[in-house]
Image: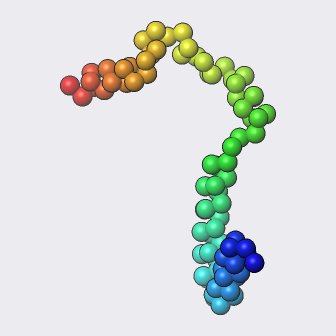
Amino acid sequence: MTAETEVIADIERKLAVLPPEALKLVADFVGVISSQYAVLTKPTPSACASLREEPFIGMWADRADVADSTAYIRKLRQEEWT
């Protein structure tokens, strides 16, 4: 038995004794976790290609005032906070 299958078996044993209300909470929790991991997965190459074709990509490429983004943000913050 691998470590992963042992963990799964342990979870199954623990779930078997829970009442329906607790199982609902577990299902909700697993749903939240799985949705977070779904967001963290890499996009497919076709999704990246279609994103590159969007008109907003590169819209600031020719702006000289934001060539150094760190300096640009530092300047904005200094103007705002002083």
Please state the total of marks drawn on the protein image: 0
Residue shown at 60%/69% (left/top)? 29
The answer to which image quadrant residue 17 occupies is bottom right
Q: In front here: 21 or 58?
A: 58
Residue shown at 72%/32% (left/top)? 48
Whole-percent x, y for residue 19 in the image: 63, 88
Q: Is residue 33 visible?
A: yes
Q: Residue furthest bottom?
A: 17
Q: Is residue 15 visible?
A: no
Q: In front here: 1 or 28?
A: 1
Q: Residue furthest left?
A: 82
Residue shown at 62%/21% (left/top)? 56
Q: Is residue 12 left or right of residue 29?
A: right
Whole-percent x, y for residue 42 in the image: 69, 43
The answer to which image quadrant residue 30 occupies is bottom right
Q: In front here: 72 or 6?
A: 6
Whole-percent x, y for residue 76 in the image: 33, 22
Q: Quadrant of the C terminus?
A: top left
Whole-percent x, y for residue 51 in the image: 70, 29
Residue shown at 61%/55% (left/top)? 36
Q: How is the image coloured?
A: rainbow
Q: Is residue 78 left or right of residue 19?
A: left
In the rendered view, tell whether residue 55 sits above or below residue 16.
above
The answer to which image quadrant residue 59 occupies is top right
Q: Quadrant of the N terminus?
A: bottom right
In the rendered view, tell whether residue 72 sits above or below residue 5.
above
